[in-house]
Image: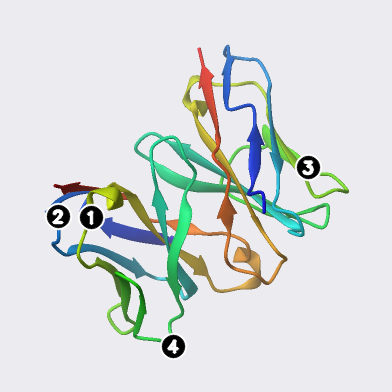
Amino acid sequence: QQQVKQSPQSLIVQKGGISIINCAYENTAFDYFPWYQQFPGKGPALLIAIRPDVSEKKEGRFTISFNKSAKQFSLHIMDSQPGDSATYFCAATPHGSSNTGKLIFGQGTTLQVKP
Amino acid sequence: EAGVTQSPTHLIKTRGQQATLRCSPISGHTSVYWYQQALGLGLQFLLWYDEGEERNRGNFPPRFSGRQFPNYSSELNVNALELEDSALYLCASSPGRLQETQYFGPGTRLLVL
């Protein structure tokens, strides 16, 4: 079964702190790992994405770390700000033509950054 | 550049009725994807359309169907509505079949009473 497990379910961080969200997958090869940010009442917006041949990707305050052997990847938000308070989803695109087009999403993490 | 648009924003139906949801992709995008975001269940892949054809579907019953029009806009139809169909339905688009990045619209919130 194709699954992406995301943790924690919720996270509270002080302003200026580091937010870390973890995802793990099993039993399936995935080709592409995007992270999405969703604010209440809005659709998910692409934040940053990585491919399995890269171990780390950084864009501004957002960094994805990828561990292919452990089948784990994580999002780090440096210098977290109240405006980062949102729900974050990891996702993965399964390998294979029958899976083309499908994104498998984690369950989501609700982040609250306290001022 | 306008993003993905969806209509209506909210829809209230009763059990057994049919619901029709609409999506307009980003200009130049040919692929449209539909997802269901039910409370506590995350985002579940429903359907993928590209160049007017259904290319893939998720693990949903046949009463979930749709189509893509020549202008690449898309329609999702849900027949014989059940209470558990209440959810946020999200549409996404991408520039083509081999483009992995999907851009999401704001969604249509469907409530089945």
* Lower position in the chain sequence, tag 2 or tag 1: 2
- The reply to whether residue A110 is visible in this rendering is no
Q: Residue at x 21, y 59 (%)?
A: A80
- Mark 4 or mark 1, whichever is nearer to me: 1
Q: Quadrant of residue A50?
A: bottom left
Q: Which residue is mark 1?
A: A81
Q: Are marks 3 and 1 on the same chain?
A: no
Dot 4, how many residues are within 10 Å of its Cα: few (below 14), some (14-19), or many (20+)?
few
User: Relative to residue B54, is residue A67 drawn left or right?
Assistant: left
Query: In the picture, which quadrant includes the N terminus of chain B?
Result: bottom right
Element assignment for label 2? loop
Under tag 1, what secondary structure? loop
Instruction: Between label 2 and label 3, give the one nearer the viewer.
Output: 2
Disc 2 marks a residue whose amino acid type is Lys
Chain bearing mark 1: A
Callouts 3 and 4 on one subunit: no
In the picture of the structure, the residue carrying the numbered disc 2 is: A15
- In three-dimensional space, the C-alpha distance between marks 3 and 4, rounded to whole angstroms, equals 36 Å
Residue at the limit of the structure toward the right, as seen here:
B70
Q: CA distance from mark 3 to mark 1?
A: 41 Å
Q: Nearer the viewer, residue B55 or B30?
A: B30
- Identify residue for label 4: A53
Please state the horizontal and vertical placement of residue A69, each as a whole percent of the image.
31, 85
Per the model, the C-alpha gap separating discs 2 and 3 is 46 Å
Measure the alpha-carbon separation of dots 2 and 4: 33 Å
Q: Earlier in the sequence, mark 2 or mark 4?
A: 2
Relative to A47, is B107 on the left or the right? right
Seen at 14% across and 55% down, the residue is A15
